[in-house]
Image (spheres, grey):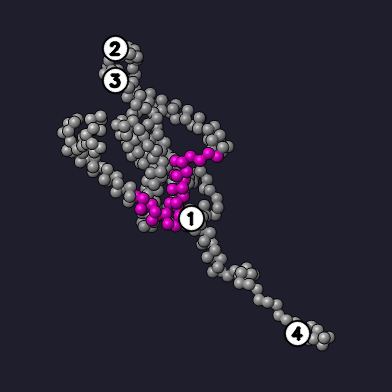
Amino acid sequence: MSMQQDRRRKHPRPPPPPSPGVELAMAPHSRDSRRVHFEEIRELDGDDSELGAGHARGRVPPWREQLTARGMVASLAVGAMYSVIVMKLNLTTGLVPTLNVSAALIAFVVLRAWTKALARLGVAARPFTRQENTVVQTCAVACYSIAVGGGFGSYLLALDKNTYEMAGEETEGNVPGSYKEPGIAWMTGFLLAVSFVGIIALVPLRKIMIIDYKLTYPSGTATAVLINGFHTPHGDAMAKKQVNAFTKYFGISFFWSFFQWFYSGGDSCGFSQFPTFGLTAWKHT
């Protein structure tokens, strides 16, 4: 018995090999594994080198980098286009849909095309970040919101003398002399007052509704998710699909409206008066 114990002391049994997971954890990370791990983190973060080096370092760009000249030009163009659209809808139907999501899409397409064109010409351009995309989308929405909230399709049109005379001086509430010819200077001051009142009211509401109560608003949430999805390594492909679908259905709607207008024969004739939902429903329109 003592001889066996002496033999075990001289020749100890080797320890069992570690499991694959422990061996992998104990092994030093090679350069390739660190590179793969960094790429996985970078892909999950949703950034590449072209989409902003500042966010890749884990910081938000300062506001001076978010407000750019190209962003202001793009927001002016998109806002002017959307102002025409909402004015047409406001004057015909009286309803204005929320265009935040589509404004973010158009802003991304315009600025991404601009940066790619400069890159092909060999001109260095500032990286296009999701913060700049948000600023352009916000400015475009503010443009058409002023067009709607300023009353260009409603009460501003009812202030002049022509509308006063068309309504009739004997109409109830149409007091003699109660009209106003809105000029450029007067409308500019009126819109500035309306806009600043909205900003003053927005600051406390944001503090209460969003910061304190953390309420989730569908339009803002959908816009944020869309913009984050654009600024990923696969964002260009997704934006291209959405723009193609947007262009396709916009073209169908435009050509169908043009067809109805071209073959109209009056107020009660033409393809615009086609009884899509039956003659009974058409008689009640």
**Amino acid type, mark 4:** His
Q: Which element type, helix, strand or loop, lies under badge 2?
A: loop
Q: Residue 5 lies in magenta, yes or no?
A: no
User: Which residue is disc 2 drawn over?
Assistant: 170
Label 4 vs label 1: CA separation?
Answer: 57 Å
Which of the two marks, 1 or 2, is nearer to us in this view?
A: 2
Mark number displayed over residue 176? none
Mark number displayed over residue 47? 1
Most extreme residue toward the right, as rendered? 2
User: Which residue is disc 4 drawn over?
Assistant: 11
Count residues near mark 3 (Cα–Cα under 10 Å), then give few for <14, some for 14-19, many for 20+: few
Q: Position of residue 184 (x, y in %)?
A: 35, 26
Q: Position of residue 127 (x, y in %)?
A: 45, 52
Q: Residue at x 29, y 45 (%)?
A: 250
User: Which residue is disc 3 drawn over?
Assistant: 163
Q: Which residues are magenta?
A: 214-243
Out of 91 and 280, give the one closest to the viewer.
Answer: 280
Q: Residue at x 23, y 30 (%)?
A: 283
